[in-house]
Amino acid sequence: MRIGFYNPRVGFARSGGTETFIRQIAKQLQSDHEIVFYCGEGEIIEEVLNLDVRIEQIPLISKESATNRAITGATPVIPAEVESLTMFRNARRRGIFEEMDKQVDIVSTHYYLDNILVSRVSPVPMVFRFPGIKQPSVRWKAMARLGHPNAYLANSRATASRVKKWLDIQVQDVVYPGVDLTMFSPSADPVFDEELVAVLYVGRLDEGKGLFELLNAQARLGDRTRLYLVGDGTLADDLQAAVRDLDIEDNVVFTGAVDHGEVAHYYTAADVFCLPSHHESFGMVNIEAMACGTPVVSTRIDAIEEYLVDGKNGLLVPPGDVDGLAAALRRLADDASLRERLGRNARETASQFSWDAQTARLEEIYERLD
């Protein structure tokens, strides 16, 4: 089968989880299928150049450009929309869509505006996969009305449920984010050796992640644990100020951003992983930690409850509950046998989310639509 992925930033270094998903799926598919990336013109990262894929670069006004900033500064349009609109315009000018049916049998989009635009001109069956949805925004509502793909997919059952409730879109199937079970493994060499029980957070230091609750929970644990925060974001300075105010500077370590290929070594160094988010569309970092055999404390929200069962393969607490979070972390800090049992079960659960399993699901969907 010939499979196309239409995404402005899939070839760029500065991209997100959606682009990581596309690149990993393409890596899995390339041995049995012909893959084409329809992506923005610019410097393509080595990871993409090393794939056995055809790259169709299309000019766009990138997020990083002064022109994009000028447009978004003077209009309600956001940077990603400028990229999407300009890439689509140039694709039409170059006759990309007229030639698409000679290149691919099916095409996938992953951004709401790409779905609206491409689904109206695509000569081949098209699939849109929801990467997650936090609220029924005007943009999502516009897509629900104006987008016409042949199938909608979701990254979790929770996302599929929200899409049905908020947008009245019936998702045909779920394709979860995948985890590399070779990279994320208990055998990954730990990056640090901690005398105290090491609690780890990995992700953006942004609103909605429950990080101030995590710091307050750490303050209640005293010298039982040391908290490692891996990542960067808008709250970095505020979180460091909170650490000083709570007088826990000796027991909190900010590592800054870490390359994705190195994160497994932090998971295996940690005794406990904690994701205290208020909302998630899936919570991939939980799965990565679980694949490394690290017991997880996370929040009782629908997307996370799809794979994390309290007391079986992790511990769950209500979002925003500092007392509950501190109690769960204390329970694991004080009980090595519980950490070992939950970590073992977590690794078994994570195996269900391998890239092989998710690629097979996607292949079945493509074959039904071809």
Image: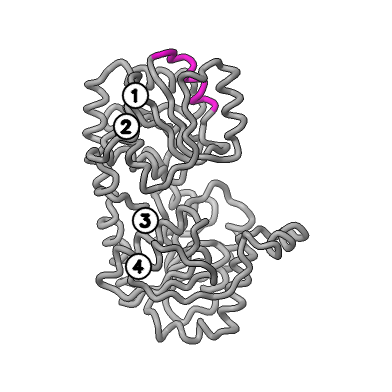
Q: Nearer the viewer, mark 2 or mark 3?
A: 2
Q: How is the image coloured?
A: one colour
Residue stretch rendered in magenta on the structure: 212-223
Rendered image quadrant of residue 129: bottom left
Disc nearer the start of the sequence (2/1): 1
Disc nearer the start of the sequence (4/3): 4
The answer to whether 226 appears left or right of 362 in the picture is: right
Secondary element at tag 2? helix
Q: Are marks 2 and 1 in contact (CB under 8 Å)?
A: yes
Q: Nearer the viewer, mark 4 or mark 3?
A: 4
Disc nearer the start of the sequence (2/3): 3
Which residue is label 1 attached to? 194
Along the line of sight, the residue nearer the viewer: 220 or 256: 256
Residue 254 locus on image (x, y percent) = 49, 31
Amino acid bearing label 3 = Val
- Residue 269's tag is 2
Amino acid bearing label 1 = Glu
Distance, label 3 to label 1, CA atoms, is 39 Å
Q: Check if residue 213 falls in the magenta segment.
A: yes
Q: Are marks 3 and 1 in contact (CB under 8 Å)?
A: no
Q: Give me the residue at 48% from left, 18% from top.
A: 250
Along the line of sight, the residue nearer the viewer: 297 or 13: 13
Which residue is label 4 attached to? 51
Which residue is label 3 attached to? 174
The answer to whether 166 appears left or right of 101 in the picture is: right
Along the line of sight, the residue nearer the viewer: 180 or 352: 180
Distance, label 2 to label 3, CA atoms, is 32 Å
Amino acid bearing label 4 = Leu
